[in-house]
Image (spheres, rainbow, N blue to C red):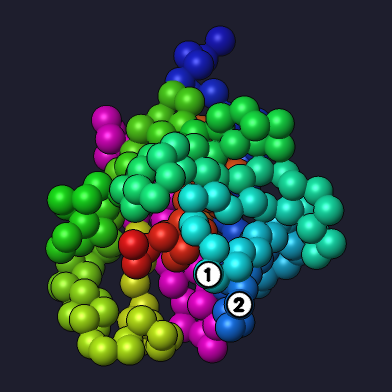
Amino acid sequence: MPPASSSPAPMVVPRFFVTQRITPMVNRYEILAADPDGAPGALLALAQQRRMKLKEEVVFYSDESRSQAVFSFKARQRLDVHARHDVLDEYGRVLGSFSKRFAASLLRSTWELSAPGLEAVGRERRPVLAVVRRAWGAVPYAGSLPVPFVFHFDFTDSTTGAPVLVSERQKAVRDRYDVTVPDPRLDFRVAAAMAVALDALQSR
């Protein structure tokens, strides 16, 4: 029997897409399966959040009706922009967690991601672009405009350096991310929560 640390997660999705739709009052994220031809397919989960609401918690639903919550992520401390967030299943059980490294993120956004048997670190792929993005953020009213840069995140195992999760922003009218999960220890719900947080919490 393989060691527990190498066991696959209960729910594994090797590739999916995250599509964001922005309205004046709501941020909406759709998690879409990747079809065999690589195109976005069926809806796997949906999250919707009022833009003026505090971002300590984001809930994911099974379909457009938003009648059944299937997982969520929630900050451990309210009003703390650098708090660790727990990813919870539909019954409130912890599946994993993530947090942003404040000091390292001043120049290049860096995240820590934890799941059973797995510790990973994620960073913006291109350090120079990370600096340019920060300069853009300092421009007056830039925060209300679409981000004009295509940026990617790579998460690697803290022990082995092997790839764990990759989020690549695609050039599209709406924000869309192509997410691959080469490590089967990472549960889909944790991967999806982390992928959404990279957009929803990135500017914090």
Q: Secondary structure at mark 2?
A: loop
Q: Are marks 2 and 1 in contact (CB under 8 Å)?
A: yes
Residue 98 seen anywhere in this rendered image of the structure: no
- Residue 129 screen position, x and y as percent: 21, 75
Crowd tier of the residue under label 2, counting other residues whose Cα lies within 10 Å: few below 14, some 14–19, many 20 or above? few
Q: Earlier in the sequence, mark 2 or mark 1?
A: 2
Residue at 27% in and 39% down: 161
Q: Quadrant of the C terminus?
A: bottom left
Give the residue type that dot 1 points to: Met
- Give the labeled residue for mark 1: 52
User: Is residue 173 shown in magenta?
Assistant: yes
**Which quadrant, please, contains the N terminus?**
top right
In-image side of 130 versus 188 (left or right): left
The quarter holding residue 162 reads top left
Q: Is residue 94 above or below residue 81?
A: above
**Residue 23, numbered circle:** none
| Residue at image coords 34%, 67% | 203
Q: Residue furthest top?
A: 1
Q: Which mark is residue 25?
A: 2
Tell me the kind of residue under disc 2. Answer: Met
> Splitting the image into 4 quarters, where does residue 120 fall?
top left
Q: How many marks overall? A: 2
Q: What main secondary structure does the magenta stretch of the protein show?
A: strand
Relative to 142, does residue 36 appear above or below in the rendering?
Answer: above
Say which element carries label 1: loop
